[in-house]
Amino acid sequence: MMKKRCVIYPKDIQNITGKSERYGQVILCKIRVTFCKKPHQFVTVDEFAEFSGIPKDTIESFIH
């Protein structure tokens, strides 16, 4: 059984959106601001799903 990740990284956002890895970094910064997180804190799949409007199931299919 494969474990699911709860954290999302810039490379994941690149794979999902087809944009650059730098774009993924910018999106993660925006999510941290939106959710009042500190720069060192991780962004979860749930937070990315809420911010982006992409269903969690779809995101999880990209990050296996």
Image (cartoon, grey):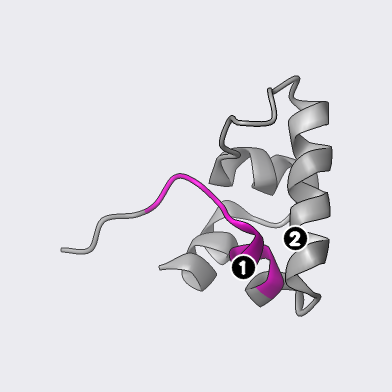
* Amino acid residing under circle 1: Lys
Figure quadrant of residue 29? top right
Residue 51 placement (x, y as % from top left): 77, 43
Left-right relation of 1 to 60: left
- In space, the residues marked 2 and 1 are separated at their CA atoms by 7 Å
- Mark 2: secondary structure: helix
Q: Label 1, on which residue?
A: 11
Q: Is residue 53 visible?
A: no
Q: Are marks 2 and 1 in contact (CB under 8 Å)?
A: yes
How packed mark 2 is, by other alpha carbons closer than 10 Å (few <14, some 14-19, many 20 or more), is many
How packed mark 1 is, by other alpha carbons closer than 10 Å (few <14, some 14-19, many 20 or more), is some
Residue 3 among magenta residues? no
Q: Earlier in the sequence, mark 2 or mark 1?
A: 1
Asked if residue 25 is positioned above or below residue 21 in the image, the reply reads above
Residue 24's label in the rendered image is 2
* Amino acid residing under circle 2: Gly
Q: Identify the magenta region.
A: 5-14
Which residue reaches farthest front? Answer: 40
Asked if residue 53 is positioned above or below residue 36 in the image, the reply reads below
Residue 20 placement (x, y as % from top left): 79, 74
Asked if residue 9 is positioned above or below residue 20 in the image, the reply reads above
Residue 63 placement (x, y as % from top left): 48, 66
Left-right relation of 63 to 64: right
* Front residue (pair 29, 61): 29
- Mark 1: secondary structure: helix
In the rendered view of the protein, which quadrant contains the N terminus?
bottom left
Figure quadrant of residue 2? bottom left
